[in-house]
Amino acid sequence: MHRQRILSSLLLIPPFLLLVHFGSAFHFSLLVGLVIALAAWEFSRLCPEGTDPGLSLVTILGALAWHTAVTWGGGLAGVGAAVGGVALVRATLVPAGFRVGLLQGAWIVLGVTYVGGLLSYTSLLRALPEGRQFIYYLAFAIWAGDTGAFYLGSRFGRRPLAPRISPKKTVEGALGGLAATVVVALAGSSQVWPRLSWDKAAWVGLVLGVAGIIGDLCESVVKRGAAAKDSGSLIPGHGGVLDRLDSLIFAGPVLYVLVWLGWV
């Protein structure tokens, strides 16, 4: 498990950093689009009321359309209306009945907004003048938090953080993840985001760490509702794409809002 986790990270992180460094905002948005498609497919397969190729297709296309509308600045309201309309029309055709069809339709809308809506903010971050720095800062802070929570929680975890949602997550792991996030955020302020003062870097790192924990717990709720251990098996040692990005899905929008408000 640990060996697979480390090997997967070594294989995936360098190409990601190379694309961020040498690629344009457009290239990065293409990567985010691919990730959204994979995550939307995983989410569609977790539907508690059952799934089928049509449900997966609508979820993937809706999430990609949302990302396109957000990234290129137009038509977002139309995308939301179209997804809701398609989900309702589909509900009238589901052989299992209207109740199942409506619940599956609600799952589609949730998947499109959760995956397509929240992950799109990473593309918006990259498109900003300091986009590369923002993505580096976000990625390293969240990776540090996930790693700290995993290993410190495995070694020292005793008190459950949210036993009803995820029995294996502990208070000690969460605190270790927050500490690791703040440390890396402080280091990043001097390396990749030098205009960020030390005190500001500390509280931004803390906020991102808390957002990451919330994102992790929210994905656990989805898996618990679907009675699934992992969202998928695409990334050995980590599970699926959603398992790997659950913290970043929430932290990305938080960082974008902080930048948009001019607080950082």
Image: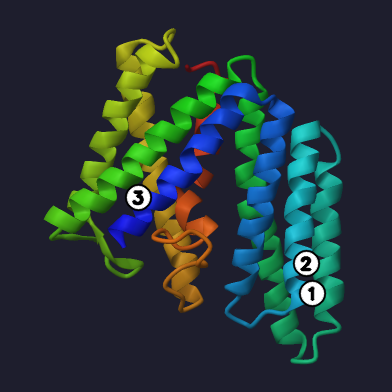
Label 3 crowding class (10 Å Cα cut-off): few <14, some 14-19, many 20+?
few
Q: Can you identify the residue that label 2 sits on?
A: 57
* Residue situated in front as seen by the camera: 138 or 220: 138
Q: Is residue 192 above or below residue 25?
A: above
Sequence-wise, which precedes: disc 3 or disc 1? 3
Kind of residue at disc 2: Leu
Q: Where in the figure is residue 192, as x and y percent of width and height?
A: 44, 16
Q: Are marks 1 and 2 in contact (CB under 8 Å)?
A: yes
Vertically, is 187 above or below 49?
A: above
Badge nearest the viewer, 3 or 1: 3
Lower sequence index among marks 3 and 2: 3
Nearer the observer, 31 or 253: 31
Q: Nearer the viewer, residue 171 or 34?
A: 34
Residue visible at 80% across and 32% down in the picture? 73
Q: Which mark is residue 6?
A: 3
Select label 3 or label 2 by which is in front.
3
